Amino acid sequence: MSDEVLQVLDSKFRSFFGREAEVVAHAPGRIEVLGNHTDYNEGYVLSAAIDKGTYFAVSPRGDGTARLVAGDVMEAVEFPAAAPQRSESAMWSNYVKGCVAGLNERFGAPERGFDAMFLGNIPLGSGLSSSAALECSSILALAKARGAEISKLDAALAGQRAENEWTGVKCGLLDQATSVFGERDHLVMSDFRTREFKPVAFPDDVCFLVCNTHAKHALVDGAYNERRECCERAARFFAATLDHPVRALRDVTWNEWLEHSGELDPLAARRAAHPIGEDERVLAGVELLREGDVEAFGRLMFDSHRSSREYFENSCPELDTVVDAAQKIPGVLGARLSGGGFGGSAVVLVRRRDAETAAAALAAAYSKVHGTPCDTSAVMCSDGARVVRP
């Protein structure tokens, strides 16, 4: 969490609205460490909230108008707080409008509107889930401003619903759940069938580097939704084929995929291989961390990226450059794409003592191939979303 970002937001809020923000909430971005595209397949994920995120500041108004400002570009929209409508011009506002609509449905139409502004330090399109950070921070701040209580899980679900229904991305619950359930110095182990979220201690002699490739990262274009549909099609096939209940790909083992994938259409079979393998890697990874075997854990990260590249095809040349380079750099234990894929960032597991030299080597290797260095920075496993004022 950055005090500097909050200070800038406070200043901009005062300048634009002529008064102080009464409520401020913060929600972090996230890195996905193992378990890619498993959340909507009712599977497992290891992830972490990070020390980059979004602040959302709000003060109630005396009328029913909602005024919302994107603090980075100072673009503003107005809408009735009791009846928000999707915007075709200011698409960014739909993330918050969807959250407002969800709160209205849960708690009733508000008697008053609000002035709100948000600002964060998550690079847009980096694959670190700036959208979930915006959703979760807005939900917590707006609920607090209207005197309502909302649980962590319900806040995450409301953010997911807003993204599904108001932006057209059929995302699972991973991003929002990590943002609210994060804990300092821990990963989050998520079970998306039972909706249990447990902390897993993370060794203090290793850390993560995030390598932002600046490659296009856009999920609304249908690539995400196509892969989800393939997974659902494969789950229906295995439900009709296997002699035990299959509700989602979580219920299919790797050996069962090997035995029966030739009977499924090739695209769906290839797509399904990825989340099936990822579930097994997550469960193995938790045990390896408990045993302190970070080297073997890192190898699982490399295996995960290989699966993304070969089966799910949600990597890209820029991400592959980072991961390929990481395999040759001393002190690096593992690397993979983070998040939906198709661009954005890679996450690299490295010995803390080697982080600085590894970051420089990764940037240089990337520049050699693509002409400019990738942005590489260390991130800390941090606490989840919360109201920070009052």
Image (tube, rainbow, N blue to C red):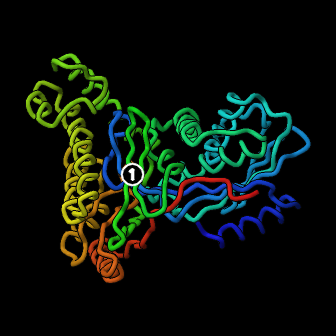
Camera sees residue 216: no
In which quadrant will I find the N terminus? bottom right
> Is residue 238 left or right of 116 when viewed as pictured?
left
Camera sees residue 199: yes
Q: Nearer the viewer, residue 1 or 91?
A: 1
Residue ID at (51%, 45%): 176
Residue 340 in picture, x, y percent from top left: 38, 48
Residue 321 in picture, x, y percent from top left: 26, 66
Residue lying furthest front in this view? 291
> Is residue 75 left or right of 366 when viewed as pictured?
right
Give the answer, above or below, for where 66 lies relative to 82.
Answer: below
Residue 331 in picture, x, y percent from top left: 24, 76
Q: Which element type, helix, strand or loop, lies under badge 1?
A: loop
Residue ID at (16%, 20%): 242
> Is residue 60 left or right of 120 when viewed as pictured?
right
Amino acid type shown at disc 1: Gly
Tag 1 residue: 339
Residue lying furthest right in this view? 62
Residue ID at (20%, 38%): 273
Give the answer, above or below, for where 193 lies relative to 350.
Answer: above
Q: Nearer the viewer, residue 277 or 15?
A: 277
> Is residue 180 left or right of 374 when viewed as pictured?
right
Residue 164 in picture, x, y percent from top left: 52, 35
Disc 1 residue crowd, few under 14, some 14–19, many 20+, Cα 10 Å: many
In which quadrant will I find the C terminus? bottom right
